[in-house]
Amino acid sequence: MTKFISHHIKAALLLACATFTTAYAQNSNTQPPIEEETVNFSLLTLNVDGLPGKIFVFDVNADGPKSEGSERISEYLASKDCDFLCLQEDFNYRWEIWSRLFAGYDHDEWSGGIILEEKEIDFAHLQNFRFECDGLNAVWKKGITPRRHERVAWNSSFGKFSHDFDDIITKGFRRHEMTLSDGKEVVVYNMHMDASSDRDEAKGNDARDREARKAQWVQLREHILNNMDERPIVVAGDMNSYYHRDDIKTVFIDAIEATGRAVVKDAWVEANNNGKYPALGSDAIDGETLDNILYISPIGGYGLKLLSFEMDEKGYKRDGVPLGDHYPLIAKFQITNKPYDNISESMPNGIYQIVNEGQSTPDTYDLNGIRQTGDLTPGTYIINGRKVVKH
């Protein structure tokens, strides 16, 4: 009797293994399916508030963290154990910021600080005065391999000795092509846009600041589209932009998705605002910050799934006082394979036909950018970033 039961158990196990193997073979190309909550990489973005106290006679950062505070910021960054760190305003306290990170991280080139003693000044042509540094620095864990790095300055900026002094430094973005320790690849943009002071906004004197940021969003968009391939993209940094003040949705997100080449999402919008973008001209929303993490999944390539997102207000304090004038944003991502299987490339002109029952997905919009729910009526839609015709 025991031997009979043993034979039956063994047969059942063999059948189960055979069934699993068959299912795996039918649902796998060359690699096993990704675990539902596998974290491929984490990313933190932070303006480290590294400006000097004064530039010429102007107080620009009298209450900044300076040397001692920058070491505390370094301690904080090391404690978070993130795979990527996108830092902005990493100017005059570079080595203090790096002091707790060198053991476990590598970094890209530092473009220098705002140091007047090292700068020749042509007082007859102060309108041309500019520091060549951008304050940007990307940091990544050892074991992640950088493949290509590019530094790009903004074509448009405003404010030499006013409007937050944006034109006195060489702001812009950096693009990093990275291979993770598991062999997967990702492209990371680290950027810093023109600012607006509270004073100028209150007086309605920030039109040229907003124009500069709009031009910068367009420049960034075109750079991304010109260099896009099958790798997923993260865009992080101090964007000095609010959705209710700057038309990011139309100029950047909708414009990229309208090409049918990629899906663009905002980590804060997805995680903390129910996937809804604040309307341009609306009231400010609690929790929206000038810092952002956007992520882009190319159509037909590798996608990004946001697993978690937080703005770490509590952790970025010492004795109840913030370490700097921005709070860190932290996101965890999973890299997925070909997430757009419900749409077939059935037409050569870039327009696609729905091959399911015409039920909307969470990423279905009409041509006015309004999210669709339920059954779709005949018409043209943007689904997962592709233009789709439902008959």
Image (cartoon, rainbow, N blue to C red):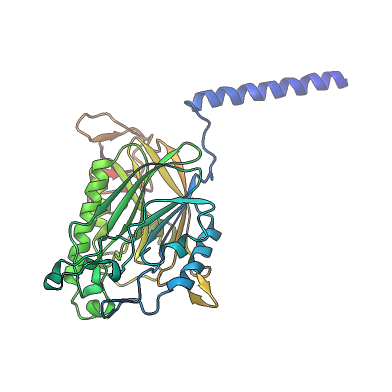
Q: Is residue 14 above or below residue 362?
A: above
Where's the N terminus, which quadrant? top right
Q: Nearer the viewer, residue 285 or 309?
A: 309
Left or right of 137? Residue 166 is: left
Where's the C terminus, which quadrant? top left
Q: Residue at x 50, y 46 (%)?
A: 142
User: Which residue occupies the extreme left position in the image?
Assistant: 124
Quarter of image, res 259: top left
**Where residue 327 sits: x, y (%)?**
43, 67
Quarter of image, res 227: top left
Left or right of 238? Residue 217 is: left
Q: Nearer the viewer, residue 356 or 38?
A: 38
**Where residue 14 sits: x, y (%)?**
69, 21
**Where residue 4 sits: x, y (%)?**
83, 18
Q: Residue at x 36, y 36 (%)?
A: 301
Q: Residue 369, can we see it? A: no
Q: Is residue 252 above or below residue 350?
A: below
Q: Nearer the viewer, residue 296 or 365?
A: 296
Q: Nearer the viewer, residue 372 or 155?
A: 155
User: Which residue occupies the extreme right position in the image?
Assistant: 1
Q: Is residue 359 above or below residue 91?
A: above
Tally of numbered discs: 0
Q: Residue at x 23, y 67 (%)?
A: 168
Q: Residue at x 21, y 75 (%)?
A: 162
**Where residue 335 sits: x, y (%)?**
45, 42
Q: Residue 79, can we see it? A: yes
